[in-house]
């Protein structure tokens, strides 16, 4: 019961919106790092209630030296992770950042991310909007599907 209450509380504090209320974030969470790992990933749902398309173009956090926008794609029958320049958030729609799709790749994690902790993220959009949010750190079986800690991210180029 306590675990359920903590999860519900984490979901409630993760719902953030921009000043005009057009952009909101729900269900944010960041993957806990296994021992010795210095990379992680964050996931969330971005909702855009405006009549104008938005694009997420950058993310800042003190928890990592760099955050890249990534997408998992199928290429030659293999699933590959690639950086992208932006994540589209359609007017009246949403962008789902989840394992196996778009996500926020955190490189050079400053210290281990432990379940029950949280990190601060600042989302930056192409139109200059910024959105601050708190993302709880969690372990989940779904996160094991894409173990980012063993991937070499140093040779990935950004999509044009």
Image: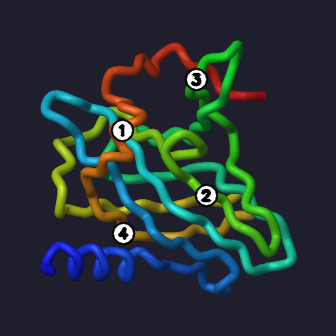
**What residue does disc 3 label?**
80
First in sequence: mark 1 vs mark 4: 1
SS for tag 3?
strand
**What residue does disc 1 label?**
65
The relative height of residue 106 versus residue 159 in the rendered view (above or below) is: below
What residue occupies the far right of the structure in this picture?
Answer: 51
Give the left or right position of residue 100, taking residue 140 as reference: right
Percent position (x, y) of residue 121?
A: 42, 60
Q: Nearer the viewer, mark 1 or mark 2?
A: 2
Percent position (x, y) of residue 137?
A: 27, 57
**The one of 81 and 50 positioned closer to us in this rendering:** 81
**What residue does disc 4 label?**
134
First in sequence: mark 3 vs mark 1: 1
How far, Cα to Cα, is label 4 from label 2? 17 Å
Give the left or right position of residue 60, taking residue 20 as reference: left
At a point 49% along the width and 78% down the height, the residue shown is 16
First in sequence: mark 4 vs mark 2: 2
Instruction: Report crowding for label 1: few under 14, some 14 to 19, many 20 or more residues within 10 A (C-alpha).
Output: few
Q: Nearer the viewer, mark 4 or mark 2?
A: 2
Instruction: Report crowding for label 4: few under 14, some 14 to 19, many 20 or more residues within 10 A (C-alpha).
Output: some
SS for tag 4?
strand
Q: Nearer the viewer, mark 3 or mark 1?
A: 3
Q: Nearer the viewer, mark 3 or mark 4?
A: 3
How far, Cα to Cα, is label 3 from label 2? 18 Å
How far, Cα to Cα, is label 3 from label 4? 28 Å
Percent position (x, y) of residue 44?
A: 50, 61
Instruction: Report crowding for label 2: few under 14, some 14 to 19, many 20 or more residues within 10 A (C-alpha).
Output: many
How far, Cα to Cα, is label 1 from label 2? 24 Å
Q: Nearer the viewer, mark 1 or mark 4?
A: 4
First in sequence: mark 1 vs mark 2: 1
At a point 25% along the width and 47% down the height, the residue shown is 32
The relative height of residue 61 versus residue 111 in the rendered view (above or below) is: below
């Amino acid at each position: 019961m306590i675990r359920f209450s903590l999860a519900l509380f984490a979901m409630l504090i993760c719902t953030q919106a921009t000043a005009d209320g057009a952009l909101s974030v729900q269900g944010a969470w960041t993957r806990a790092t296994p021992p010795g790992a210095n990379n992680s990933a964050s996931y969330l749902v971005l909702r855009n209630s405006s009549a104008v398309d938005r694009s997420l173009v950058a993310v800042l956090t003190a928890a990592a030296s760099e955050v890249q926008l990534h997408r998992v794609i199928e290429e030659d029958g293999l699933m590959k992770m690639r950086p992208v320049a932006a994540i589209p958030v359609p007017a009246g729609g949403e962008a789902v950042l989840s394992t196996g799709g778009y996500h926020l790749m955190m490189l050079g994690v400053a210290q281990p991310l432990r379940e029950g902790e949280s990190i601060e993220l600042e989302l930056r959009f192409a139109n200059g909007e910024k959105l601050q949010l708190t993302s709880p750190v969690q372990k989940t079986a779904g996160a094991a599907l894409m173990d980012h800690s063993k991937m070499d991210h140093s040779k990935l180029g950004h999509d044009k």
